[in-house]
Image: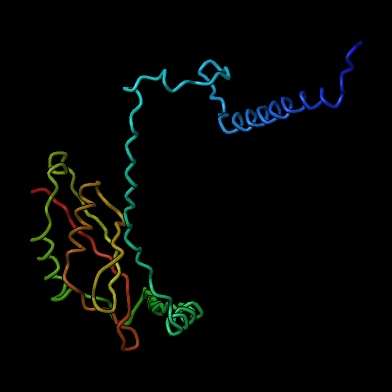
Amino acid sequence: MELKKNPDVDNEKVKVPLIFLGFFIVASLITLSFSYETPVMADDGSDRERDKSEIPEEMIEEQPEEDEPVVQELPEPDIPPPPTEESVEEENVDEDEEIVVETPPIVIEEEEEPEPEAPIVDYPDQEAAFPGGIAAMKQFLAENINYPEVAMELGDQGKVFVEFVVNKDGSIEQVKVLRGVSREIDREAKRVVRSMPKWTPAESSGEAVRARCRIPINFILQ
């Protein structure tokens, strides 16, 4: 006679171990999830997890705490006070005012026009004369003529005719030689005439006038 297996009995035997196996798997998964660590990148770029136990204790030192940076307080810059309304008005007034530079008036001095020279009278009513007369003039010429040495060595001598103008005040000007002897003697004749004192001026119609005079001067070797 064959014994028949009851299927309900067999399922009860298998059900209990399966439940325990399920609890074991769930517990293992929970344990692994708490013990999982993030892998550390190694120096060679691999993802292997570095074991802290392999690092020597000498290299594991506490890092010193960095000192907090000292912030130096900068001095506050001197900020000028804001301009007041009065100062702004003064600046505006100075800018608007025109700078006027007063220049002294230029005074142009008018040159005095020289008085026209009086005409020279060739034939006045009264001729101009040396003070003291002809004798005084001859004495003056004898005392003041310096005979040129060159003329003396060359033997030059003769009479020089000199012409000049006597002004209203008796002064002499425009001295020239009409007929001479030599260059040295003619030069000496003009010099001695210019050195004469003032003459008595000529007169025409009772008034002093400018007049021409002509005199001979003798240069004679003795």
The residue located at (11%, 65%) in the rendering is 140
Seen at 20% across and 63% down, the residue is: 193
Whether residue 18 is visible? yes
**Looking at the rendering, in which quadrant would you find the N terminus?**
top right
**Looking at the image, which residue is at 53% across and 15% down?**
44
Pick the residue in front: 116 or 43.
43
Res 86 → quadrant? bottom left
Residue 38, by quadrant, is: top right
Q: Residue furthest right?
A: 1
**Tally of numbered discs:** 0
Residue 178 percent coordinates (x, y): 32, 57
Residue 165 coordinates in the image, percent (x, y): 30, 69
Q: Which residue lies furthest to the top in this view?
A: 1
Hey, which quadrant is residue 10 in on the image? top right
- Kindly give the residue lying farthest to the front in the view shown: 1
The chosen color scheme is rainbow
Q: Nearer the viewer, residue 160 or 196?
A: 196
**35 lies above or below 86:** above
Work out whether residue 96 or residue 109 is closer to the camera in this orientation and state it.
Answer: 96
Q: Residue at the location (85% across, 27% down)?
A: 8
Horizontal and vertical percent for residue 186?
Answer: 24, 52
Position above or below: 4 against 154: above
Residue 110: in sight, yes or no? Answer: no
Residue 193 in the image: above or below residue 47: below
Q: Could you tell whether 156 is left or right of 124 in the image?
A: left
